[in-house]
Image: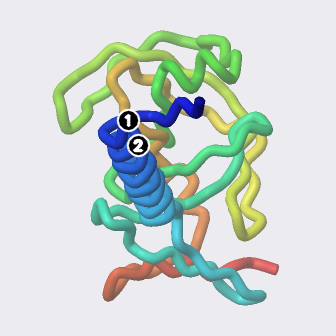
């Protein structure tokens, strides 16, 4: 005597498998869209504007992979507090910072920063802010570079 599963259970299982496959495909597509898009050659690095309208520059902070939001309006490179805590950064001094959302309390810290394209900033003094969503690459780093921005591209001339 064979015990066969009811057809409704089989149909439900098939639909669950289809929906799972669609969900995983959508997640993979979203992840691919959010990845920083850049090209690198001997003379320059080109960042393509992301789907969120910003330029994202991959690099490392204290040895940990990090993707920075390029912010030419930020005076100083700034990190979210959660990231600074994961990196084990120690507060050097408390400070108040003027942001687009108003004045917030934070602290200064130091961290080794490196970016794709070979730029390194050892012991960079950064601002750590509690309400920041993503690491911001500010003019303290960008000001050392020769860069231009046009037509959805951020181009950095590399010093070799």
Q: What residue is rendered at 59% in x and 69% in y?
A: 145
Q: Position of residue 1 (x, y in %)?
A: 59, 30
Nearer to us in this view, 49 or 16: 16
Q: Secondary structure at mark 1?
A: loop
Choose top left, top right, bottom left or bottom right for residue 116.
bottom right
Q: Position of residue 73 (x, y in %)?
A: 32, 54
Q: Local crowd at mark 2 within 10 Å, few (<14), some, or many (≥20)?
A: few
**Left-right relation of 10 to 119:** left
Q: Position of residue 83 (x, y in %)?
A: 56, 26
Q: Position of residue 125 (x, y in %)?
A: 61, 33
Q: Which residue is mark 2?
A: 10
Residue 34 in sight from this viewpoint: no
Q: Where 34 sits versus 102, above or below?
A: below
Query: Residue lying farthest front?
Result: 1
Instruction: Verify CB contact (< 8 Å) between mark 2 and mark 1.
Output: yes
Residue 17 in sight from this viewpoint: yes
Q: Secondary structure at mark 2?
A: helix
Q: Where 136 sits versus 88, above or below?
A: below
Q: Which residue is mark 1?
A: 6
Nearer to us in this view, 54 or 20: 20
Q: What residue is rendered at 67% in x and 38% in y?
A: 124
Q: What residue is rendered at 38% in x and 59% in y?
A: 72
Q: Where 72 sits versus 117, above or below?
A: above
Q: Where 157 sits versus 54, above or below?
A: below
Choose top left, top right, bottom left or bottom right for residue 111.
top right
Tally the numbered discs: 2
Residue at mark 2 to residue at mark 1: CA–CA distance = 7 Å
């Amino acid at each position: 005597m064979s015990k066969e599963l009811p057809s409704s259970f089989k149909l439900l299982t098939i639909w669950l498998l289809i929906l799972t496959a669609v969900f995983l495909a959508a997640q993979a597509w979203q992840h691919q869209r959010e990845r920083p898009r850049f090209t690198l050659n001997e003379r320059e690095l080109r960042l393509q504007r992301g789907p969120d309208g910003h330029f994202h520059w991959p690099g490392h902070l204290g040895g940990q992979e990090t993707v920075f939001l390029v912010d030419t309006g930020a005076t100083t490179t700034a990190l979210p507090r959660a990231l600074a805590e994961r990196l084990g950064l120690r507060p050097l001094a408390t400070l108040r910072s003027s942001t687009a959302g108003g004045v917030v309390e934070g602290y200064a810290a130091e961290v080794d920063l490196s970016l794709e394209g070979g730029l390194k900033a050892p012991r960079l003094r950064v601002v750590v802010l509690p309400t920041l969503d993503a690491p911001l690459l500010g003019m303290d780093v960008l000001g050392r570079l020769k860069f231009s921005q046009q037509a959805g591209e951020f181009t950095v001339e590399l010093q070799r």
